[in-house]
Amino acid sequence: MRAQRPHWQRSDVFALGALMAFQSANNLQNEVLRLALAQVLDSERFSAFTADDSTQAYPLVLPPSSKDETALARTARRVALLDPETNPRMPTLGFGSNGWVLAAQKSASGLPLFAFDSHDELGLPNLFYEVHLFFGEQRQLRGWSVAGLPGVINGFNEHIAWGFTNIGDTQDVFLEQRSADDPTLFKSAGAWYRARSESVSIAIAGEEARELRILHTRNGPLISDDPPLSLAWAVQRLPAPALDSMLQLNLASDWRTFNAALDAFPAPSLNATYADVQGTIGFRTAGALPLRGTGEGLMPLDGSQPANAWQGMVAAQAMPQRVNPPEGFFAAANARVNRAGDGPLVSADNAAPYRIARLQAVLGRPGRFTLEDMQALQMDRRDEQAAMVLPTLVQGLNGVELSPRAERAQALLANWLPDPVADADSAPALLFQQWYLSLAEELFAADTGELWPQLAGRSYLLNQALDHLILRAPDSPWWRGERSLLLARSLERALATLAGKHGDDMSRWRLDEQLHVRLRHALGDAAPGAGWLFNAADVPWAGGPSTVGRARYSYARPFAVDAAATVRVVAEMSKPPRVLAIMPGGQSGHPLSPYYADQYPGWLAGALLPVSSRPPQPAGQALVFRPQ
């Protein structure tokens, strides 16, 4: 008879933290997919998936200062099972997010303003739950945490406010050279060495434990036998698991103590936006980042060459950071932090510049902002992707014979371009998003073959490649020498798709007829007939994957919004901070609780609720915890 283990242990906390760090790192899937694409594409076409357009007028967060196709495709599919977007059985613990702070001189109240919205997979119960801790002599800690982790991840105390946005490439894949005679031997610098073998016992409910054998190469554990791929991950290089830095930043009182806590923050890697009641605003990158021997972490490298291996870790003091900038604001939105060569490489695999460009444009305007302005910006639905690529797409149709319907569509999109807002009732917003999808499939699907579904599921990778082709590479072989014709053909396909769903009169089309937001519980679809109890109904919505008011969907499952703001919060840095916030769903995880989904209507409408700054006064008996 197996011994009973406690329901929750210290090791479980670290396991949850490691899973969160792994999913936030997010680069493993891109590297393996690029490796597989490199085997089915010629070098010129493959270059679209490694193009670096950040040397152009890119809105950086900080200003400058083996060829077995079947085996690789199979490996890419296996690795994709680690991605919650591909495998719904995987928990979703990664961070997306927008975060920005404004200095006192840009605030109507004369106090710094803070805004944050975390972008994660939507679901019931919500990923985050709200925490209010009032303790000691007028001390407080308020914010949002994840079940199973101590402390507050994003939040406030009586002195400071902080929010974390995901950034940083902490994973690299290496293509190892393995002995054909002895599978435990690997090559390095022309000589063979024996990999370290580790056996791990995996407990399985209702079954006997299973033994898993792991081979550790000099670059990291082997994650694939065919081809032999190893994974270097920053978390594997940490000296010991620790949560002290999270608890220290929860109690930090100023920029110095906040930075001291983040100096020791291990993972996940992230950007922090910061404001305090003394008037300071700040930005910094934190978490363990590697010093690469070669490359930018976009493609697997030869593991037998020591020059390719990691050369150590970036020192905490070398991380990008800045405080009290003359422009009076910081903004972060998963975009590239710094230009190549300007400080340590944080990541070359980032979100496209749509959201950060919009945030910088709005926050850089003259005048002073209010909390209401911050709230409105969190729901902003200007499609900066359309503003960037649509003029080139529309112009590319000139000189091609179009059907009357396509000519009307061209005019509709051209009229929308001066202010491309993806409102709920917008026909051109729907048409643009469908055209973009159709163009991606027109260009990539046939030549990438069995890899196309995975590419469609990696939106950042697809965006960077397709936008590069549209804006920078009009003569790329992807266009097959008939660029205008392919643009017209993909537009016609998009129109046919939309007409089949919404009728021929495109003036009556609406984005919210197709774009829907959904909240699902893991048991809602798993248990027959249980959806009515666990799931929320699908709701028509607005925005899109590239808007600040995020409505992200997978290009593999278009228009089904599965990720958006799992918390929205704005604050004015008074003493203590005045805070407004909301979550999709509610505070309770029990489907029969009145607080299971009570915040959802307000969240859909862009409303915010006041967050109490004083402890409640109990009407009856109260349980008081006093530390010894």
Image (cartoon, rainbow, N blue to C red):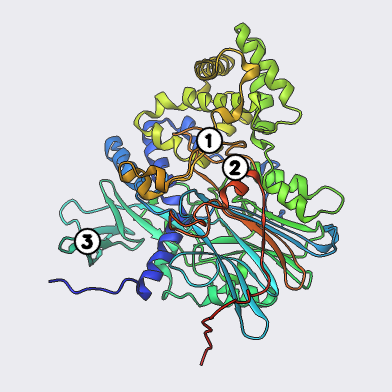
Q: Quadrant of the N terminus?
A: bottom left
Question: Residue tagged by mark 2?
Answer: 352
Label located before the other in sequence (3 or 2): 3
Residue type, label 3: Ile
Numbered disc in front, either 3 or 2: 3
Q: Is residue 99 left or right of residue 279?
A: left
* Element at label 3: loop
Mark 3 and mark 2: Cα distance apart in space:
41 Å
Neighbor class of circle 2 (other Cα within 10 Å; few <14, some 14-19, many 20+) is: many
Neighbor class of circle 1 (other Cα within 10 Å; few <14, some 14-19, many 20+) is: many
Q: Which mark is residue 516?
A: 1
Label located before the other in sequence (2 or 1): 2
Q: Which mark is residue 204?
A: 3
* Element at label 2: loop
Mark 2 and mark 1: Cα distance apart in space:
23 Å
User: Within the image, what quadrant is residue 424 found in?
Assistant: top right
Q: Is residue 161 left or right of residue 621?
A: right
Q: Is residue 184 left or right of residue 55?
A: left
Residue type, label 1: His
Mark 1 and mark 3: Cα distance apart in space:
37 Å
Toward the right, the furthest residue is 367
Query: Is 310 situated above or below 26?
Result: below
Query: Is 259 situated above or below 309?
Result: below
